[in-house]
Image (tube, rainbow, N blue to C red):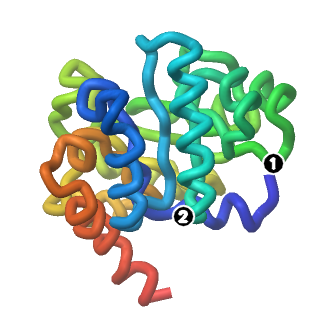
Amino acid sequence: MTRDKRSGLRGLYAITDAQLSPKHHLLQHVEQALLGGAAIIQYRDKTDSASRRLADVTALRRLCSVHAARLIINDDIELAKRVGADGVHLGAEDNAPAYARTILGEDAIIGVSCYNRIDLAHRAAASGADYIAFGRFFPSRVKPNAVQAHPELLTIAKNKFKLPLVAIGGITPENGAPLIRAGADMLAVIHGVFGQTDIQAACRRLTRLFEPQEKSR
């Protein structure tokens, strides 16, 4: 991955959810998120048919291109390659970043969930990850049983790794700023975006959290 691509990994990272955004609402919901300032969209759907997922991602690829946003596919390396997505997000139990790199190429964005574990982050970084994600940081409606991480983990990781960091889990406009101050480059949000009545307004509030940090540089 080029340095320019990696340095652009900052801002609101909106993750789709099949229950919050049913098929006939998906594109409309994602467009509202993009209009609200989402910099990255992750398509996450582990239950639908392969043909439906291909159709979804093909349409999302076009939409993200219009808005100059990145499209990341959750777990499915082959789907990401087929549609020319910007990259893939892997869990600790998924295919290693090094394998994903051989399939997707050097310019792909490869992210890895590291939960609350620095050892997993070390492994991901050594395997060629482009960003690492920690969380959940707050109670989550989508993953209520996920392990909890603490904000100081972001500070520790920031000092250890020269990689962008993602914070995820129960993030809202009210609690997101401390995570950015602790070291998060991106805030990954599911329910706080797609579970809101006004998705665009919700994204604007979350995106605004990054403004003071940008101005202070």
Note whether 132 is above or below 148 in the view shown.
Answer: below
- Does 8 sit above or below residue 112? below
178, above or below 15, in the image: below
Q: Position of residue 6 (x, y in %)?
A: 68, 59
Left/right of residue 117 with respect to residue 3 in the rendered view: left
Nearer to us in this view, 153 or 101: 101
Camera-side residue of 158 and 82: 82
Measuring 30% from the left and 71% from the top, which residue is drawn there? 209
For residue 39, side relative to residue 203 (left or right): right
Return the x and y of residue 156 as percentages of the image width and height: 46, 51
Q: Amino acid at mark 2?
A: His
Give the mark toward the camera: 1 or 2: 2
Residue 185 image point, x, y percent: 47, 60
Mark 2: few, some, or many residues within 10 Å (few <14, many ≥20)?
Answer: some
- Describe the element under mark 1 as helix, strand or loop: loop
Residue at image point 37% right, 38% down:
26
Q: Which residue has dot 1 on it?
A: 107
Q: Residues within 10 Å of mark 1 (few under 14, many from 20)?
A: few
Q: Is residue 137 left or right of residue 129?
A: left
Q: Earlier in the sequence, mark 1 or mark 2?
A: 2
Say which quarter of the image contains residue 201. Answer: bottom left
Secondary element type, mark 2? loop
Say whether residue 87 is visible: yes
Q: Which residue is mark 2?
A: 67
Q: Which residue sits at x=19%, y=33%?
A: 140
Q: Quadrant of residue 123 in the image?
A: top right
Along the line of sight, the residue nearer the viewer: 201 or 138: 201
Mark pair 1, 2: CA separation: 20 Å
Q: Is residue 160 visible?
A: no
